[in-house]
Amino acid sequence: MTPRTLAGLVVGVSLALAACGGSDPETAGDTTVAAETTAVATTDVPVDTTAAPDEAESTAPQAIISLSPTATEMLYAVDAGDQVVAVDDFSNFPPETADKRPGISGYEPNVEAILALGPDLVITEGSNTDLLDALERAGVATWVGAAAVTLDDVYEQILGIGEATGNADAAAVLVEDMRADVAALMARIDALPERDEPLTFYHELDPTYYSVTSDTFIGTVYDMLGLRNIADLAEGESYGYPQLSAEFILDKDPDIVFLACTVYCGDTPETVAARPGWDILTAVAEGNVIPLDDDTASRWGPRIVEHMDTVVTAVEAVLAERAG
Amino acid sequence: MSGQVTGAPAGATPDPSVRAATRPTLPTVVVSIVVLIVVATAGAMIGPAGPAWWRVPLALLERLPVVGGFGIDSGVTEREWSIVWNIRMPRVVLAGIVGGMLSVAGASYQGAFRNPLVDPYLLGTAAGGGLGATLAITTLGPARESWPVDPVPIAAFVVALLTVAVTYLVGTSFGGVRSASTLVLAGVAMVSLTTAIQTFVLQRNSDVLREVYNWILGRLSTATWSDVGLVLPYVVVSWSVLVVHRRHLDVLRVGDDEATSLGIPVARVRLVVVVAATLGTAAVVAVSGLIGFVGLVVPHMVRLIVGAGYRIVLPVTVTAGASFLILADIPGRTLTAPAELPIGVVTAFIGAPFFIVLLRTRQVAG
């Protein structure tokens, strides 16, 4: 049990365990958790008094394997990082996961390689049912965190992972913290001047113009922030991930272009501006081609608030530019 | 790049009697060119966005140097024109080049191997191209976006040619060039090997899975004029060499031994035809990905319409193939608009049933 885990517990469990956690505040380092102390304490104290921490600790899984980058981020964010023995190849955040990647592919996981690591809990996003069946036959517990559709799904999943790993309190703190962050972002949106027409945007998944509709998780996030998605006209196709035609994108002339493949595809505002014909786009002319972090813009994890912050900042910049 | 061999023997002095027999092909070729122009114009007029379809020809005329002076007003805005000129036109032109190249390469391969079920990917062009693209995407990573030239098509082109070269060396070292079937079998082996390597590399780098998959499905959707410029030199060389050799292919139809006794250097002709067809195919695969069935189906469509003689089949497959792919790309762009349908899906969707019918009629006839 690291100081970090302790700090998370302390915050949730409130003053009852002050003796244990009292020496740790400076090592906690997690300012967001600390900031939430008061808000959580009131709601969670009754629950926590019923759960004896020692008992929870003994039954909690201590050899977790995560095959989902989103689940990995959630695990570390609810202070279950020390219980994780291995993660899949794409789980690149937080940086502490670096020495826990034995080369297990999330796409084509090798069941024997997973079992060889002796997990007591395997977390996946559930698309590989063969794997889940095999793990079940081998008697390994599994927990599925399927792709979220709304922010509420995200909160629910974080709480679920907290529950499954014996970190329910830290999870509750994290969720309250995220709710507060989202509320703050929504307040920034509400503070913007009224508009007759919402700003339009194009979310580019890769340089061949794949995009997302509002049916997807990332799509609902933009929707929450009051933006209009040009890809929604392609709804009903491609399970929410249509490949748009370049003609259509130029014709719709979105106010903002969000690039969600900056790390893996090397998309930049410059490469977009250099595409033949794309110079006529308002977003290109006004400098509103916004590079995103590929990972925060595709995972339904705790860092979704960072993605939302990028989007809100972009919207504020566009409106400020046009007003000024 | 590796275009050195294509300038090789451009055919012996043609027999005057053979030349006489080619004359009736002229009207057929002219008709096929007219069809191509009509289809290409339609392709330029139809799209999910941009100006009303009937304004497009006006806008084209308006921008012509001389005709434009007559005060034509198409009413097309700069934005609409940019969509037509920068997005749609390169796509139509590239589809035409790719379709024409794959078709004529398919017809030539079918002639060189005397096998109607052969397509231009037979000796490993497609598999090699796919491997080259996969290697470039996985090893170079996103840094390649900032390169002045996209290295992916170049890698696809080079590896495609290397794969075919290995196939040829393997095939001819055991069976000799005279045995076309040995070469075909060597192709099967090389395609399997190359595909296996590609699958292995992909499996080790599954983060680029979608990127490679997109590439394989065909990429007309991001066509630019620079893509057109990139392939055109190779394709023109390839077309010229193949069309020049159309009479040799006719003679090959009677069999290797008979053709040899008629004074045709069978091995050399087969080598030149295969090299020329491969060069062009590798170039179009490099910019457009793997577009299935065009190279197999279009030559057969052409044979059904104009007869089996290569004198006429080869030139007509160029224009027919171009028309076919431009036509196939129109539903690709518009059917699910504003979403795209990969061109490889459309051609295979049309091509597969056609292929089945073809097999059936062959069975009935034979």
Image: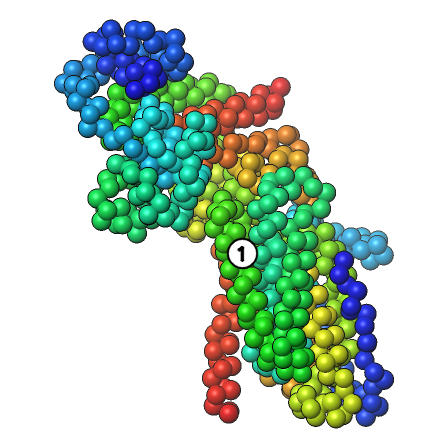
Secondary structure state at the residue bearing disc 1: helix
Identity of the amino acid at label 1? Gln
Residue name at image x 57 percent, y 23 percent: A317
Residue name at image x 79 percent, y 64 percent: B4
Closer-to-camera residue (B304/A102): A102
Horizontal side of A125 relative to B353 (left or right) equals left
Closer-to-camera residue (A191/B172): B172
Estimate the x, y position of residue B79 in percent, counting from the top left.
67, 44
Q: Residue B9 sits in which quadrant? A: bottom right
Q: Residues within 10 Å of mark 1 (few under 14, many from 20)?
A: many
Q: Which quadrant holds the N terminus of chain A?
A: top left
Horizontal side of A6 relative to B314 (left or right) equals left
Horizontal side of B116 relative to A303 (left or right) equals right
Question: Is residue A121 something that shows in the picture?
Answer: yes
Estimate the x, y position of residue B262 in percent, counting from the top left.
76, 92
Read off the residue under disc 1.
B198
How many numbered marks appear? 1
Question: Is residue B57 something that shows in the picture?
Answer: no
Estimate the x, y position of residue A288 in percent, counting from the top left.
60, 30
Closer-to-camera residue (A198/A158): A158
Q: Residue B329 sits in which quadrant? A: bottom right
Q: Which quadrant holds the C terminus of chain A?
A: top right
Q: Residue B308 sits in which quadrant? A: bottom right
